[in-house]
């Protein structure tokens, strides 16, 4: 009579059970593919402030792709830490093995919720007064004010707490571990909410400068990665705050002189599907 394999032996043969190097390659590969898709989807679009976000389905698809491109490199240390802990617990038969993608799905769900909230706010403002954000009306002042507010948020205790959480993955995993796939999904969502708390201001800056601008996407993604991964990331927030406050004032006063800022209406119209 055949003997059933031990749980840990079966898990070792699972194609979903990858070593840390393979997981890192997959994360960076998905981020790279997401950037390529984003570049292709945004080709020929108006990259300036106040760009129409299109239909909900189209926006949701491009937003999730953008978040995968921008956020996966900076969240990689947390994902790798989760993979190591769940591997160790499974090898000691303390718990069933949980694929890392479950944690990542929870993380992206948190950013999806943020994107839906931003989309809803945009549509609400558009329904109340569709022209208030026009660049020849209050657009530069609203964009500049939003960027200044995002810069000031960089100096708040909430930003500090959320950034410290994002920079110390093992503390979160050891003190907030939940078993099973639902637990991994919950942990990913919880970490995603901390990440939203850390970076929502940076995304406000992206919306203000042009959410469909590949240039500003790359700049904001670079800032996020530096804050979360570089050794001096905590101190970098102060420099970013100063830069954002100065940039916001500059845009409010003389938007046409800001390098890299596409003036609304100067680019091709957006050809989006609903």
Image (spheres, rainbow, N blue to C red):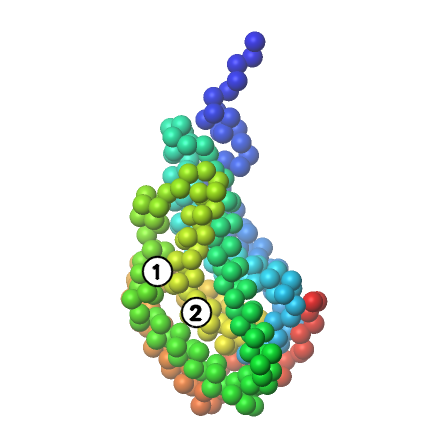
**Depicted 98 relative to depicted 241: above or below:** above
Residue under circle 2?
A: 202
Q: Nearer the viewer, mark 2 or mark 1?
A: 1
Whichever of callouts 2 and 1 sits on the residue coming sooner in the sequence is 1
Q: Residue furthest front?
A: 128
Q: Quadrant of the N terminus?
A: top right
274 displayed left or right of 62: right
Q: Is residue 47 visible?
A: no
Cα separation between marks 2 and 1: 13 Å
**Depicted 50 relative to depicted 224: above or below:** below
Q: Residue at (47%, 46%) from the top-left corner? A: 185
Name the image quarter holding residue 244: bottom left
Most foreground residue, 170 or 221: 170
Q: Position of residue 211 (x, y in %)?
A: 54, 71
**Which disc is residue 273 wearing?**
none
Q: Secondary structure at mark 2?
A: helix
**Depicted 35 relative to depicted 45: above or below:** above
Question: Neighbour class for label 2 at 10 Å: few (<14), some, many (≥20)?
Answer: many
Residue under circle 1?
A: 162
Q: Residue at (55%, 56%) from the top-left corner? A: 32
Q: Residue at (49%, 29%) from the top-left corner? A: 12
């Amino acid at each position: 009579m055949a003997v059933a394999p031990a749980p840990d032996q079966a898990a070792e043969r699972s194609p979903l059970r990858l070593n840390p190097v393979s997981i890192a390659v997959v994360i960076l590969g998905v981020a790279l593919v997401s950037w390529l898709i984003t570049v292709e989807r945004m080709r020929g679009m108006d990259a300036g402030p106040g760009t129409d976000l299109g239909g909900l389905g189209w926006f949701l698809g491009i937003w999730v792709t953008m978040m995968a491109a921008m956020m996966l490199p900076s969240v990689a240390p947390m994902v790798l830490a989760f993979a190591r802990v769940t591997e160790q617990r499974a090898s000691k038969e303390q718990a069933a093995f949980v694929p890392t993608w479950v944690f990542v799905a929870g993380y992206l769900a948190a950013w999806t919720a943020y994107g839906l909230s931003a989309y809803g706010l945009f549509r609400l403002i558009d329904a109340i007064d569709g022209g208030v954000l026009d660049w020849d009306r209050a657009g530069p002042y609203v964009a500049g004010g939003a960027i200044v507010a995002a810069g000031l948020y960089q100096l708040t205790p909430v930003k500090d707490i959320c950034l410290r959480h994002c920079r110390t993955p093992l503390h979160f995993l050891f003190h907030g571990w939940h078993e099973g796939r639902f637990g991994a999904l919950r942990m990913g969502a919880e970490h995603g909410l901390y990440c939203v708390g850390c970076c929502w201001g940076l995304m406000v800056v992206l919306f203000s400068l042009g959410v469909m601008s590949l240039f500003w996407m790359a700049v904001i993604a670079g800032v996020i990665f530096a804050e979360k991964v570089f050794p001096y990331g905590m101190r970098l927030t102060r420099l970013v705050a100063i830069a954002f406050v100065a940039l916001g004032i500059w845009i409010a006063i003389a938007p046409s002189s800001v390098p890299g800022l596409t003036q609304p209406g100067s680019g091709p119209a957006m050809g989006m599907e609903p």
